[in-house]
Image: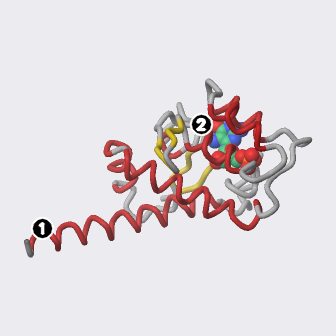
């Protein structure tokens, strides 16, 4: 059974990048994955001055609005790095927070889909034909955490 998620207050809302599960990355604490992701769009760009404002945004919605402003200059390699940027942040989120890590692991091998009606890249879009990159990242993070946990068990058994 496919598991759909979207808004942070809906079922499986902890899979949303807008959920308030903070992460430490590159020596900085970010209140949500969305804050981090939106800020990374401007690293090294002429509009990098926006980064502290994204970081300080009171909500992920406000961070996203700042990052989505179409007149600002994105970093040149953004399309090349954005999936890796997102994966690193999502992995950190689920390594940091044990409660939501359990929720993720308990989804077993189910397909995970960001049910965004507007986003055909990170989500499945209105007609379910989108690329669902966020769902795919969550599935690969789930697999990576399982491998890390099994290595920990092996390590404990032999020490
Ligand atoms: N508008 C909106 N509201 C939410 O609650 C969402 N979860 C999303 N999806 C997320 O938006 C991010 C993509 O942003 P860009 O379009 O690349 O600026 C990404 O985190 C999606 O998962 N959108």
Tell me the quarter of the image containing the C terminus.
bottom left
Q: Is mark 2 within 8 Å of ligand 1?
A: yes
Residue 7: numbered disc: 2
Seen in the image, is 96 located left or right of residue 36? left
Q: Quadrant of ligand 1?
A: top right
Residue position for label 1: 156
Q: Nearer the viewer, mark 2 or mark 1?
A: 1
Examine the rendering and report whether any part of residue 4 can be seen. yes
Q: Is residue 132 above or below residue 7?
A: below
Q: Is residue 81 above or below residue 75?
A: below
Residue 61 at x, y percent in the picture:
68, 31
* Badge 2 or badge 1: first in the primary sequence: 2
Which quadrant holds residue 72?
A: top right
Residue 110 at x, y percent in the picture:
45, 62
Q: Secondary structure at mark 1?
A: helix
Task: Give the residue at x 50% y 33%.
Answer: 20
Whole-number angstrom distance, CA of label 2 to CA of label 1: 38 Å
Task: Give the residue at x 46% y 56%.
Answer: 91
Task: Give the residue at x 61% y 64%.
Answer: 84
């Amino acid at each position: 059974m496919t598991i759909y998620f979207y808004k942070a207050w809906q079922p499986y809302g902890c899979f949303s990048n807008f959920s308030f599960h903070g992460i430490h990355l590159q020596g900085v604490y970010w209140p949500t994955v969305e804050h981090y992701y939106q800020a990374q769009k401007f690293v090294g760009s002429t509009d990098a001055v926006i980064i502290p404002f994204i970081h300080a945004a009171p909500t992920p919605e406000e961070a996203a609005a700042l990052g989505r402003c179409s007149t600002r200059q994105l970093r040149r390699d953004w399309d090349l790095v954005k999936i890796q940027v997102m994966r690193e942040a999502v992995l950190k989120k689920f390594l940091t927070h044990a409660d939501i890590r359990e929720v993720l692991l308990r989804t077993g091998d189910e397909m995970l889909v960001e049910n965004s009606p507007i986003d055909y890249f990170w989500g499945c879009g209105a007609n379910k034909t989108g690329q669902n990159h966020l769902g795919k990242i969550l599935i690969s993070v789930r697999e990576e955490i399982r491998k890390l946990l099994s290595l920990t068990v092996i390590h404990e058994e032999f020490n």
